[in-house]
Amino acid sequence: MGQALQQTKEIRASLFGIEQVVSELAVVRHAWRRRQQRSAEPGGRELPSRDALAKILNDLRGALFPMRLGPPELRQESEDFYVGHTLDTVLHSLLGQVRLELSYASRYHEEEGLHIDDRALTIVREFSRALPGIRSLLDSDVISAYQGDPAARTVDEVLLCYPGILAMIHHRIAHQLYQLGVPLLARIVAEIAHGQTGIDIHPGASIGAGFFIDHGTGVVIGETAVIGQRVRIYQAVTLGAKRFPSDDDGKLQKGLPRHPIVEDDVVIYAGATVLGRVTIGRGAIVGGNVWVTSDVAAGSHVSQASLRHEQQNPVSLV
């Protein structure tokens, strides 16, 4: 029986030329690893796992909102036990992923290789302590969405259904990881939300309380964007960079402030594009499909009509 099974496998493999494909894939992999100066020593996984982080995120959502995003059979009298047990599992899993990122980074920066286990434990402990604050921020986002959308019947509907809230759960978690020094984990967390919602928020973006993304598809928020409190934006809004400075060798300079500052109580309507390190002043309204590359004064209203008027009669908005 075993011999017959082996023969069947060999026939199937030869049918598609699998042995040759495996051999050629190995050549391509090894060439890539040599170019990237990867270790040739046999060993386990070098990079964090997207699948592992997806499981961590799912469990974290349950721990943050147990009676709404936790298991369907959960009862309130068991809530604290569930949260404690879930967090114990999640944080141990996260610790393993943090170790992987720190180990990976240490290959390029020798000083970072010192005391990886201690650093990983410190990061995960700090992340754990931040969870109550993350929950409070998310509560403010849910309330803002409920109050800002006349179609929302309850806060529970907002939490369960709105893609903007799912994106913000991921962003609040990703931003904390980013600040704690594990940017690769943070980026994976952000990209999982991006894939599920169409909302692309870089984990480096700083976003204040009460942030509401309505509808959401096509929203892009860059790494160095700074967003104040009670800001509302709609689908297809971009808070992006206007230009990408390069160094003397022609390589892009990374980490420079290049995205907008959006102050408190600003509303940006669908399709608007705001580029560069400009400031949208407190309480300003940016209309739909507007292209903004200069500062907008507090309390002002920028629309296509006002921009056309400005082009015909140039007057600064600040």
Image (cartoon, rainbow, N blue to C red):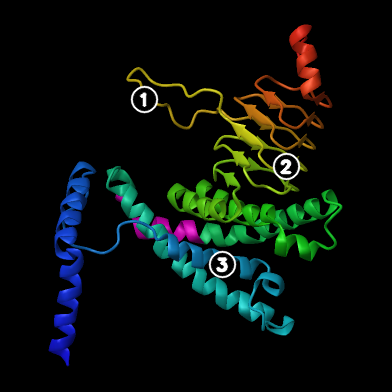
Q: Secondary structure at mark 1?
A: loop
Q: Which residues are magenta?
A: 113-124
Q: Amino acid at mark 3?
A: Asn
- Disc 1 marks which residue? 251
Are there few (<14), some (14-19), or many (20+) residues within 10 Å of tag 3? some
Residue 244 position, x and y percent, is 48, 24
Residue 251's quadrant in the figure?
top left
The quarter holding residue 304 reads top right
Q: Residue at x 82, y 55 (%)?
A: 146
Question: Which quadrant would the C terminus be assigned to in this image?
Answer: top right
Q: Is residue 65 left or right of residue 195?
A: right
Nearer to the camera, 4 or 49:
4
Q: Which mark is residue 58?
A: 3
Closer to us: 183 or 126: 183
Percent across and percent down for residue 100 are 35, 58
Residue 234 numbered tag: 2
Instruction: State the SS at label 3.
Output: helix
* Rendered-image quadrant of the N terminus: bottom left
Outermost residue on the bottom side: it is 1
Mark yes or no: residue 318 visible.
no
Q: Amino acid at mark 2?
A: Tyr
Question: In the image, is residue 287 above or below residue 161?
Answer: above
Q: Is residue 126 magenta?
A: no
- CA gap between label 3 and label 2 equals 26 Å
Between the residue at mark 1 and the residue at mark 2, the CA separation in whole angstroms equals: 34 Å
